[in-house]
Image (tube, rainbow, N blue to C red):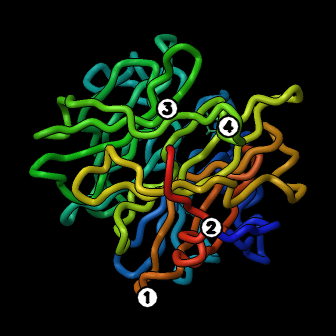
Amino acid sequence: MAKKFSYDVVKRWKGNPLLTIEDIPFPCNTVFNAACAKYNGQYILLLRIEDLTGRSVFALARSDDGYHFELEPDPVMTPCTQDDCFKEYEKKGIEDPRITKIGDVYYIMYTAVSSYGALLALAKTTDFKNFERIALVSEPENKDGVLFPEKINGKYARLDRPVAGGLGNIWISYSDDMIAWGGSRCVMTVRDDHWDSWRIGASSQPIKIDSGWLIIYHGVKSASGGPIYRLGAAVLAEDDPSKVLCRSAIPILSPREYYERVGDVNNVVFSCGAILEDDGEQLKIYYGASDTSICLGTANVNELMQFCTIGEH
Ligand code: BMA
């Protein structure tokens, strides 16, 4: 039987929030969330920042220890304005990036927003200086795209979150070239009677652990005061990640601190990435709090697993 806990299993870093608008070296409205990766021994955050026009751009922050970050002076990706890229589809901004390393390439799946709605786009970098757009890879309405770090049964795989019938579930799709996707299956659904009853979406890139693919996901409940965004965890089968092996019955992190409760959007903890340290146990989860600051939570993978129950998902 799974253990019962009264508090969040994810521990907040004592220096939270780690980055706020005051740390951003260019004019902006707010900082939302961040994808993360390790590159050349450094921790990299790719931050979703809303500029003064109200559209989101991506900026880069680097750190030697994963706790103290310095930002580059200018955004590294802004909504496309030339005809040779995705101008028409990024008119309202680029949002919620996730980074997955495959070989020596860091792929960035992000949300392109326009009057058509939100859809998934893919870009890549090998040095975090030059960023190249690859393709638009979904129709709207779709968000929360994350690539798996290796091929599954010979194909690239991704999780995403199409919205249908007002609800958002996590799906998986496969591809030979990362551009054309198919073989789609629903992986995990919202749970009527739970904290993740309205929408769910993968937050972190899938991380390989002994029991399968660990994902941190966000779950949203629609409350009378507005939606509440919390984080959960699940493990997907290594050879067939359309199968959920276990899933947290209760959230692993909920908005409780003031900076998570009050901001541009209240009651939000929303992650776009986590890093498993080399010991295979310590997980750093970077998350946006109230769409207003970037925070860090840490968790031990074995403790997280005690939260994930086996059964109906
Ligand atoms: C989601 C995304 C996130 C945001 C969340 C709460 O749809 O846009 O970036 O944190 O809503 O507002």
Classify residue 74 as left or right of residue 8: left
The quarter holding residue 300 reads bottom right
- Relative to residue 143, is residue 157 drawn left or right? left
Mark 4 vs 1, N-terminal side: 4
Q: Earlier in the sequence, mark 1 or mark 2?
A: 2
Labelled disc at residue 220: 4
Q: Nearer the viewer, mark 1 or mark 3?
A: 3
Decide if residue 74 is in sight here: no
- State whether residue 271 is above or below residue 282: above
Nearer to the camera, 118 or 171:
171
Q: Residue under label 3, please give it.
A: 169
* Residue 149 horizontal/vertical position (percent): 28, 59
- Determine whether the residue tagged by mark 1 lies in a helix, strand or loop: loop
Secondary structure under badge 2?
loop
The residue wearing badge 2 is: 2
Q: Amino acid at mark 1?
A: Asp
